[in-house]
Amino acid sequence: MKPEEIFGVNAGKVWHALKEKGALTAREIAKETGLKVTEVYGALGWLGREGKIEIIKEKKKVLYRLTE
């Protein structure tokens, strides 16, 4: 499988988790999707490049959610 296919598949998993659960941390996304945290960050980068996520900083947490 090509790297862009792997990132694309992982981005789809992350997108579905965020759609279903709302704003989540990277660790929460990893738990929901079964991905490693490093894979989650790659998928978030892919989604960010496409303008599909927002980053929310709350105190000591960083949350990710889909753009509206």
Image: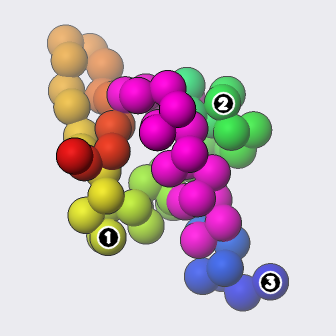
Classify mark 3: helix, strand or loop.
loop
> For the residue marked with disc 3, what is the amino acid?
Met
Q: Residues within 10 Å of mark 2 (few under 14, many from 20)?
A: some
* Disc number for residue 32: 2
Distance from label 1 to label 3 (Cα)?
21 Å
Q: Is residue 47 magenta?
A: no
Q: Determine the residue positioned at 66% across, 30% down.
A: 32
Classify mark 1: helix, strand or loop.
loop
Q: Is residue 10 magenta?
A: yes
Give the residue number, with chain letter if any, for mark 1: 50
Q: Earlier in the sequence, mark 2 or mark 1?
A: 2
Asked if residue 42 lies left or right of residue 33, the reply is left
Q: Which residue is the extreme one toward the right?
A: 1
Pointers 3 and 2 in contact (C-beta within 8 Å): no
Q: In this rendering, is residue 46 above or below 3?
A: above
Q: Quadrant of residue 63?
A: top left
> For the residue marked with disc 2, what is the amino acid?
Glu
- What stretch of residues is rendered in magenta? 8-27
Give the residue number, with chain letter if any, for mark 3: 1
Residue placed most toward the observer, 1 or 65: 65
